Image: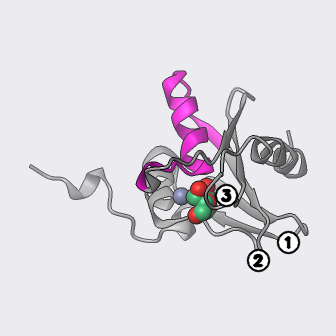
Protein backbone atom coordinates (compact mmCIF):
# COMPACT_ATOMS: atom_id res chain seq x y z
CA UNK A 1 0.00 0.00 0.00
CA UNK A 2 1.68 3.21 -1.19
CA UNK A 3 0.68 6.84 -0.55
CA UNK A 4 -1.46 7.14 -3.69
CA UNK A 5 -3.31 3.95 -2.86
CA UNK A 6 -3.95 5.13 0.71
CA UNK A 7 -5.34 8.42 -0.65
CA UNK A 8 -7.73 6.41 -2.85
CA UNK A 9 -8.85 4.51 0.27
CA UNK A 10 -9.48 7.84 2.02
CA UNK A 11 -11.69 8.91 -0.91
CA UNK A 12 -13.70 5.69 -0.56
CA UNK A 13 -14.15 6.47 3.15
CA UNK A 14 -15.17 10.04 2.30
CA UNK A 15 -18.05 8.76 0.17
CA UNK A 16 -19.58 7.30 3.35
CA UNK A 17 -19.54 10.57 5.30
CA UNK A 18 -22.79 11.36 7.14
CA UNK A 19 -22.93 15.13 6.83
CA UNK A 20 -26.55 16.36 6.64
CA UNK A 21 -25.61 19.62 8.41
CA UNK A 22 -22.28 20.82 7.02
CA UNK A 23 -22.45 18.89 3.71
CA UNK A 24 -18.65 18.80 4.08
CA UNK A 25 -17.42 15.26 3.49
CA UNK A 26 -14.08 14.14 4.89
CA UNK A 27 -12.41 10.77 4.50
CA UNK A 28 -9.47 9.20 6.29
CA UNK A 29 -7.52 6.01 5.72
CA UNK A 30 -5.25 4.68 8.42
CA UNK A 31 -2.64 2.11 7.43
CA UNK A 32 -1.68 -0.26 10.23
CA UNK A 33 1.73 -1.96 10.37
CA UNK A 34 0.07 -5.29 9.59
CA UNK A 35 -1.24 -3.80 6.32
CA UNK A 36 -4.84 -3.38 7.43
CA UNK A 37 -6.49 -0.16 6.28
CA UNK A 38 -9.07 1.43 8.57
CA UNK A 39 -11.51 3.79 6.91
CA UNK A 40 -12.95 6.80 8.71
CA UNK A 41 -15.55 9.37 7.67
CA UNK A 42 -17.06 12.27 9.53
CA UNK A 43 -20.35 11.48 11.22
CA UNK A 44 -22.51 14.42 12.25
CA UNK A 45 -25.40 14.77 14.66
CA UNK A 46 -28.35 17.10 15.18
CA UNK A 47 -26.65 17.90 18.48
CA UNK A 48 -23.77 19.50 16.60
CA UNK A 49 -21.08 19.03 19.24
CA UNK A 50 -21.45 15.27 18.89
CA UNK A 51 -20.00 15.36 15.36
CA UNK A 52 -17.01 13.06 14.95
CA UNK A 53 -14.28 13.80 12.45
CA UNK A 54 -13.02 11.32 9.88
CA UNK A 55 -9.56 11.09 11.44
CA UNK A 56 -10.85 10.17 14.88
CA UNK A 57 -13.35 7.71 13.43
CA UNK A 58 -10.52 5.81 11.75
CA UNK A 59 -8.29 5.84 14.82
CA UNK A 60 -11.06 4.79 17.19
CA UNK A 61 -12.10 1.98 14.86
CA UNK A 62 -8.55 0.63 14.79
CA UNK A 63 -8.02 0.93 18.54
CA UNK A 64 -11.34 -0.72 19.32
CA UNK A 65 -10.32 -3.62 17.09
CA UNK A 66 -7.07 -3.98 19.06
CA UNK A 67 -4.83 -2.49 16.36
CA UNK A 68 -2.51 0.16 17.78
CA UNK A 69 0.56 0.37 15.54
CA UNK A 70 0.30 2.50 12.42
CA UNK A 71 2.40 3.39 9.37
CA UNK A 72 0.52 6.28 7.77
CA UNK A 73 -2.70 8.31 7.80
CA UNK A 74 -4.25 9.95 4.73
CA UNK A 75 -7.03 12.54 4.93
CA UNK A 76 -9.04 14.02 2.05
CA UNK A 77 -11.74 16.66 1.62
CA UNK A 78 -12.96 19.05 -1.06
CA UNK A 79 -10.85 21.97 0.10
CA UNK A 80 -8.80 24.55 -1.81
CA UNK A 81 -5.67 23.49 0.05
CA UNK A 82 -4.83 20.05 1.44
CA UNK A 83 -7.39 19.51 4.21
CA UNK A 84 -6.33 20.76 7.63
CA UNK A 85 -7.24 18.45 10.54
CA UNK A 86 -8.93 20.21 13.46
CA UNK A 87 -7.19 20.76 16.76
CA UNK A 88 -9.05 17.93 18.47
CA UNK A 89 -7.92 15.44 15.85
CA UNK A 90 -4.35 16.71 15.99
CA UNK A 91 -4.38 16.05 19.72
CA UNK A 92 -5.83 12.54 19.33
CA UNK A 93 -3.43 11.67 16.49
CA UNK A 94 -0.54 12.84 18.69
CA UNK A 95 -1.67 10.54 21.49
CA UNK A 96 -2.24 7.41 19.40
CA UNK A 97 0.40 7.59 16.65
CA UNK A 98 4.17 7.85 16.76
CA UNK A 99 5.76 11.31 16.43
CA UNK A 100 7.50 10.23 13.21
CA UNK A 101 4.46 8.77 11.45
CA UNK A 102 3.63 10.50 8.15
CA UNK A 103 0.23 12.19 7.79
CA UNK A 104 -0.77 12.84 4.18
CA UNK A 105 -3.22 15.71 3.74
CA UNK A 106 -4.85 16.14 0.37
CA UNK A 107 -7.86 17.48 -1.54
CA UNK A 108 -9.86 16.45 -4.59
CA UNK A 109 -7.53 18.46 -6.87
CA UNK A 110 -4.63 16.27 -5.83
CA UNK A 111 -2.81 18.97 -3.83
CA UNK A 112 -0.88 17.08 -1.17
CA UNK A 113 1.01 17.99 1.95
CA UNK A 114 2.95 15.44 3.96
CA UNK A 115 3.70 16.14 7.62
CA UNK A 116 4.85 14.07 10.54
CA UNK A 117 2.64 13.76 13.60
CA UNK A 118 5.09 16.03 15.44
CA UNK A 119 4.78 18.67 12.71
CA UNK A 120 0.99 18.41 12.84
CA UNK A 121 0.96 19.44 16.50
CA UNK A 122 4.36 20.62 17.70
CA UNK A 123 4.77 20.42 21.45
CA UNK A 124 1.53 18.48 21.93
CA UNK A 125 0.32 18.02 25.50
CA UNK A 126 1.07 14.39 26.34
CA UNK A 127 1.11 11.76 29.06
CA UNK A 128 4.66 12.89 29.90
CA UNK A 129 3.17 16.14 31.18
CA UNK A 130 1.01 14.25 33.67
CA UNK A 131 3.32 13.56 36.59
CA UNK A 132 1.46 12.74 39.76
O1 LIG B 1 -10.05 17.48 9.11
C1 LIG B 1 -11.28 17.55 9.29
C2 LIG B 1 -11.97 18.77 9.31
C3 LIG B 1 -13.35 18.74 9.49
N1 LIG B 1 -13.99 17.54 9.65
C4 LIG B 1 -15.47 17.50 9.74
C5 LIG B 1 -16.12 17.90 11.02
C6 LIG B 1 -17.50 18.30 10.54
O2 LIG B 1 -18.30 17.14 10.34
C7 LIG B 1 -17.24 18.90 9.17
C8 LIG B 1 -17.19 20.42 9.16
O3 LIG B 1 -16.29 20.88 10.13
O4 LIG B 1 -16.00 18.38 8.76
C9 LIG B 1 -13.32 16.35 9.62
O5 LIG B 1 -13.91 15.27 9.70
N2 LIG B 1 -11.97 16.40 9.49
ZN1 LIG C 1 -11.11 16.79 13.62
Q: What stretch is highlighted in magenta?
A: 49-71
Does dot 3 land on a helix, a strand or a loop? Answer: strand
In front: label 3 or label 2: 2
Q: Residue furthest top?
A: 65
The N terminus: image quadrant: top right
Q: Which residue is drawn at 50% across and 60% down?
A: 90
* Quadrant assignment for ligand 1: bottom right
| Residue identifier under label 3 | 103
Sequence-first disc among 3 and 2 = 2
Q: In which image quadrant can residue 57 be found? A: top right
Q: 70 above or below 52?
A: above
Q: Where is residue 8 in the image (x, y as percent from the top left)?
A: 87, 47
**On residue 82, which mark appears?**
none
Q: Which residue is drawn at 56% across and 51% down?
A: 53
Q: Position of residue 117 (x, y in %)?
A: 56, 60
| Residue identifier under label 1 | 111
Q: Is residue 68 visible?
A: no
Q: Do the residues labelled 2 and 1 touch (CB within 8 Å)?
A: yes
| Residue identifier under label 2 | 81
Sequence-first disc among 2 and 1 = 2
Mark 2 Cα within 10 Å, few/some/many (few <14, many 20+)? some
Mark 1 Cα within 10 Å, few/some/many (few <14, many 20+)? some
Question: On the rendered structure, is 67 left or right of 24?
Answer: left
Task: Measure the alpha-carbon separation of dots 1 and 3.
Answer: 14 Å
Q: Which residue is drawn at 66% across and 41% down?
A: 40
Amino acid sequence: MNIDQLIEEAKIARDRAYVPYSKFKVGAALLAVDGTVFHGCNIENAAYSMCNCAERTALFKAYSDGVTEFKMLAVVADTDRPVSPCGACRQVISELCSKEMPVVLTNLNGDTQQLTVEQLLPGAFSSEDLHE
